[in-house]
Amino acid sequence: MLRHMLSNAALIAGLAISAPAIAQDTPTADTVMATVGDTEITLGHMLSLRAGLPQQYDQVPPETLFTGVLNQLVQQELLMQAHDGEMSTAAARRLENERRAVLAADVAEEVVNAEMTDERLQEAYETQYADADAGTEYKAAHILVETEEDALKLVEELENGGNFTALAQEHSTGPSGPSGGDLGWFGDGVMVPEFSEAVTTLEVGAISAPVQTQFGWHVIKLNETRVKERPSLDEVRQDLLAELRQAAIDAYIADLRSATTVDQADTSAFDPALINQTDLLEN
């Protein structure tokens, strides 16, 4: 995480320095990469810092990232060794929070790994998708005008051979007007009820009678329909995994809370703006 680092700028500055030559013997997490005074900085320290970097660093070449991470740790160690006197109250509290967060994440990972089996994933997929009814999607266009009279004139013109796209570009007040009224593909429940009901009663290629909604009067043309296929397990795998992970953690925390005395203060007596009074950290 970024708070492990002095700053992004410090890391980026470190990235400009060429990488030191490292022995090619099979490295482990205990392989020493640098020694600062009597303190060893290992590959494990580097990997831990790397794992917490934002996703943007995935684009940095490995040789550049390697050097930047190592230099960052060396700089941090030098500054830490230069620290003199008692640790500030604010720093001590940050360390307590950091320890809490790291250990909590470690336990959460164990819980999640124990729950994430192929069987659980398949069960979740079948529950959410396998038995779901395949829906219909519609591809339609519309011309939106202010009055029913204007809409009736457009219907008459279309019945006499008028070009729907051209008329939409000329008359529609909706944002889709410049593109000929094209609304793309949409499923049930996406459009307002009056519009959806009108679309579902049309034959492909047909033009609707004027339809009134909260936005005005619509003349609708149904261009195409298709059956919305259920997604495959691979397509929804990541979403299902995220849901299962969250459910596992929520259940585990609920169990812990029920077995532990948790006494929270009545916060209604406090001004929520207290959360921004960081000057209180040193009190």
Image: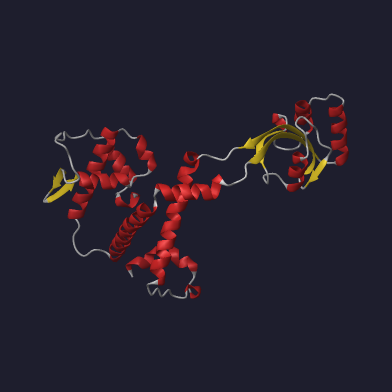
Identify the residue shown where x is 37% and y is 44%: 54
Q: Is residue 246 visible?
A: yes
Left/right of residue 273 with respect to residue 74 in the rendered view: right
Identify the residue shown where x is 54% and y is 40%: 231
Find residue 216 and report its horizontal and vertical position in percent.
79, 43
Q: Is residue 132 above or below residue 157?
A: below
Left/right of residue 35 with respect to residue 172 in the rendered view: left
Quadrant in the picture for the C terminus: bottom left
The quarter holding residue 148 reads top right
Find residue 202 and report its horizontal and vertical position in percent.
78, 36
Nearest the viewer among 28 and 244 is 244
Find residue 91 and report its horizontal and vertical position in percent.
29, 61
Identify the residue shown where x is 18% and y is 47%: 41
Q: Is residue 73 visible?
A: no
Find residue 121 and report its horizontal and vertical position in percent.
44, 48
Nearest the viewer among 114 and 280 is 114
The quarter holding residue 264 reads bottom left
Left/right of residue 195 with respect to residue 48 in the rendered view: right
Nearest the viewer among 116 and 210 is 116
Identify the residue shown where x is 18% and y is 46%: 42
